[in-house]
């Protein structure tokens, strides 16, 4: 598939996401990707195996990006120490929030690893946090945060996230720059219960 894409689009930034589909027995297949000038191959091996990822990264030129392997600052620290990757996908919801995401960002920046932010089908509130964190300087690769309209007829934040020519403008208002719309949240609330 990558070979065919490269025939038509020889110069576009292109990555492959393997979602843990391979093992080190597939080293020849993965090494063949070096011919296609990929930005990265994301999570080629098992989510819990940073040792085999280190072996793979030492044997291929294509940058390995760890995604499902990174649940915390400690996971990132160990992966960097072992040489398991050259890129980390920071997902705020998986690593435990903005503080841990910032720590991982700073660690990667100190060690010269690129980072990017992958989405997890968040509502506007979650995507607002993704937009905020990706305004940090080491987020140099395109993320996959999408416009509200791609997922929702009506998002529960104001303003809704919009994309213009592949770019999301980072708001300059206080906080994360987006506000929950209590009117919209009430509109879509199916039931509520109060405890006193």
Image (cartoon, rainbow, N blue to C red):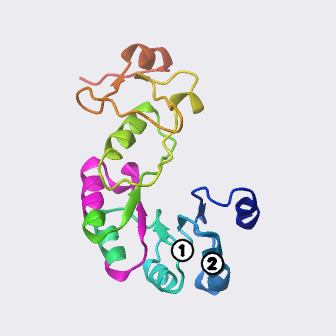
**Horizontal and vertical percent for residue 170?**
35, 34
86 magenta-colored: yes
The image position of residue 60, as x and y in percent, is 54, 82
Span of residues in magenta: 81-106
Q: Secondary structure at mark 1?
A: loop
Quarter-of-image position of residue 116: bottom left
Mark 1 vs 2: CB contact within 8 A: yes
Q: Which residue is mark 2?
A: 30
Residue at 49% from the left image edge and 72% from the top image edge: 63
Residue 62's disc number:
1
Q: CA distance from mark 1 to mark 2?
A: 9 Å
Query: Is 186 above or below relative to 165?
Result: above
149 or 40, nearer to the observer: 40
Residue 174 falls left or right of residue 193: left
Dot in front, 1 or 2: 1
Question: Looking at the image, is mark 1 or mark 2 earlier in the sequence?
Answer: 2
- In which quadrant of the rendered image does the N terminus lie? bottom right
Q: Position of residue 125 (x, y in %)?
A: 39, 33
Viewport quadrant of the C terminus: top left
């Amino acid at each position: 598939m990558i070979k065919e894409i490269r025939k038509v689009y020889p110069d576009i930034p292109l990555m492959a996401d393997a979602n843990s589909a391979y093992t080190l027995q597939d080293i020849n297949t993965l090494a063949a990707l070096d011919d296609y000038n990929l930005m990265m191959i994301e999570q080629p091996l098992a989510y819990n195996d940073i040792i085999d990822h280190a072996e793979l990264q030492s044997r291929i030129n294509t940058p390995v990006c760890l995604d499902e392997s990174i649940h915390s600052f400690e996971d990132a620290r160990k992966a960097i120490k072992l040489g398991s990757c050259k890129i980390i996908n920071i997902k705020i919801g998986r690593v435990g929030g903005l503080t841990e995401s910032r720590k991982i960002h700073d660690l990667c920046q100190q060690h010269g690893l690129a980072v990017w932010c992958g989405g997890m089908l968040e509502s506007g509130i979650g995507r607002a946090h993704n937009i905020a964190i990706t305004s940090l300087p080491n987020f140099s690769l395109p993320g996959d945060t999408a416009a509200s309209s791609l997922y929702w007829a009506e998002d529960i934040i104001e303003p809704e996230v919009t994309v213009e020519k592949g770019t999301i403008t980072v708001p300059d208002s206080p906080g994360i720059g987006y506000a929950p719309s209590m009117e919209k949240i009430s509109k879509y609330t199916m039931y509520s219960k109060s405890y006193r």
